[in-house]
């Protein structure tokens, strides 16, 4: 019992020493500042860290700045180093709405900030807040999302544009004077950026897709419940090869299908469908196109994307394929890659060949010729070797013997080295050949 108390005291003392170190270097205050910031992800991690070390988690500001109360504005003003003016903001009842519309003139005359440098500092902080703010509560047309896709600097004007009744569909009709007077875009370079983005397009959605097309090469669609890990792995492997990949990791939590996802599909050149066990179950008889994967795959076909199925080893198409909706049933006839985790580099090589167009995504041969093609939909097994007169491997269900001359087994060190090199080359060849390219036999 005494030993237990001694151990506990030693652990507590060690934790106290760590806490003192964190206090000395100012980490705790920095964590508290981040924890109270509007950045949701950073604030969460900082709050978790403070909780672990036993520190109080500070007041948290929402990213929904238009919904801020007077107290929220006061807290933010103090947090950015303008505490001496917090009382003035309270006296003038400045809430989130008024803060986003605040001008430098009002800052000088109403708030009493006489110093030019102080006003510049404050406006710089306010611009950063406008860019980080979430306007979804007042922005039904996703105007801010579009402006951000053009340039984060343009997000500064979002709230004023929304306040004046603008939405995304009206943007192409803006004149240079309207941008300046109605939108408050005084910076001529910002007006030029917006005009250049608008001038060559008839519809606002076309502009967004054109912008996104420069940011996305590959869209990955998957069933979160069974395909999350494989989809994430494929994303990383493609990114390592220089591809720009979009994968929606938050679709499960969105509550409803995000129509913006479809624009990412339209923008991407290639569409990878990760097929894992039961990933198509919800599509059976889904004739109203309510399932996420159904919507995404339908969009890919509709816009003629290069659809590349990747099959998990345990995946099987539904027994009654006629239960799949007509608009996406053709996926059962597509060639694809059977994913083998032991040979993931060879698998991603095959995926890249589909991306580059070196492999056909749909069967180009007649039924009789396809029947001659060896069936490769069976699970690929790892190559196995036996030291002796032959090396044996089972690939796609058939046994292949690689003969070894008896003389090599009896040779000295030089011949032994050659034999090892030969076996290594044979092993690499077998690994490459054992990755199945799944050809449709339908």
Image (tube, rainbow, N blue to C red):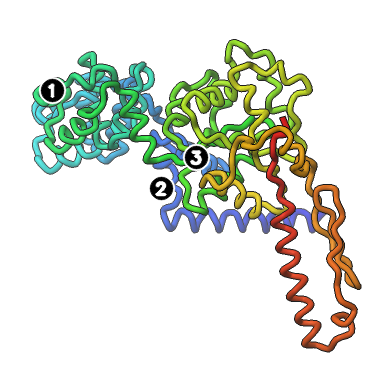
Residue highlighted by disc 1: 175
Residue at horizontal 18%, vertical 30%?
A: 195
Mark 3 or mark 1, earlier in chain: 1
Q: Quadrant of residue 316?
A: top right
Residue at horizontal 30%, vertical 23%?
A: 204
Q: Quadrant of residue 335?
A: top right
Q: Quadrant of residue 201?
A: top left
What's the distance in space between the residues labelled 1 and 2, CA to CA?
A: 45 Å
Which of these two is toward me, 160 or 144?
144
Q: Report the quarter where the C terminus lies.
A: top right
Residue highlighted by disc 3: 218
**Mark 3–mark 2 contact, CB under 8 Å?**
no
| Element at label 2 | helix
Q: Residues within 10 Å of mark 2 (few under 14, many from 20)?
A: few
| Element at label 3 | strand
Residue highlighted by disc 2: 30
Task: Say whether residue 180 is visible.
Answer: yes
């Amino acid at each position: 019992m005494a030993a237990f108390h001694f151990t506990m005291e030693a652990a507590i003392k060690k934790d106290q020493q760590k806490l003192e170190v964190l206090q000395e270097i100012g980490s705790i205050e920095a964590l508290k500042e981040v924890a109270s910031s509007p950045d949701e992800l950073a604030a969460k991690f900082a709050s978790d860290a403070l909780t672990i070390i036993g520190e109080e988690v500070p007041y948290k500001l929402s990213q929904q700045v238009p919904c801020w109360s007077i107290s929220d504005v006061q807290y933010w003003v103090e947090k950015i180093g303008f505490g001496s003016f917090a009382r003035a903001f309270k006296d003038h009842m400045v809430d989130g709405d008024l803060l986003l519309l605040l001008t430098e003139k009002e800052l000088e005359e109403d708030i009493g900030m006489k110093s030019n440098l102080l006003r510049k500092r404050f406006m710089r902080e306010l611009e950063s807040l406008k860019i980080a703010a979430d306007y979804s509560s007042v922005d039904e047309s996703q105007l801010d999302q579009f402006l951000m896709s053009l340039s984060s600097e343009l997000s500064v004007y979002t709230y004023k544009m929304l306040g004046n009744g603008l939405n995304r569909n009206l943007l192409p009709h803006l004149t240079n004077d309207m941008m300046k007077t109605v939108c408050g875009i005084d910076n001529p370079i910002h007006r030029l950026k917006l005009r250049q983005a608008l001038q060559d397009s008839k519809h606002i959605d076309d502009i967004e897709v054109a912008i996104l097309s420069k940011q996305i090469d590959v869209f990955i669609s998957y069933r979160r419940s069974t395909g999350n890990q494989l989809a994430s792995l494929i994303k990383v492997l493609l990114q390592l090869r220089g591809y720009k990949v979009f994968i929606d990791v938050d679709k499960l939590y969105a509550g409803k299908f995000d129509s913006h996802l479809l624009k990412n599909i339209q923008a991407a050149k290639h569409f990878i469908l990760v097929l894992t066990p039961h990933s198509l179950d919800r599509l059976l008889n889904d004739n109203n196109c309510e399932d996420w994967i159904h919507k995404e795959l339908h969009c890919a076909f509709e816009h003629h994307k290069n659809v590349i199925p990747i099959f998990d080893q345990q995946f099987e198409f539904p027994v009654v394929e006629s239960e799949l909706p007509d608009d996406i049933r053709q996926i059962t006839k597509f060639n694809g890659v059977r994913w083998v985790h032991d040979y993931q580099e060879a698998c991603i090589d095959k995926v890249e060949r589909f991306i580059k167009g070196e492999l056909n995504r749909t069967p180009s041969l007649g039924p009789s010729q396809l029947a001659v093609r060896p069936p490769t939909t069976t699970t690929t097994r790892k190559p196995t070797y036996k030291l002796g007169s032959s090396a044996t491997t089972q690939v796609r269900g058939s046994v292949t013997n690689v003969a070894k001359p008896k003389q090599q087994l009896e040779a000295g060190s030089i011949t032994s080295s050659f034999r090892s090199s030969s076996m290594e080359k044979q092993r690499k060849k077998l690994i490459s050949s054992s990755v199945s390219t799944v050809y449709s036999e339908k």
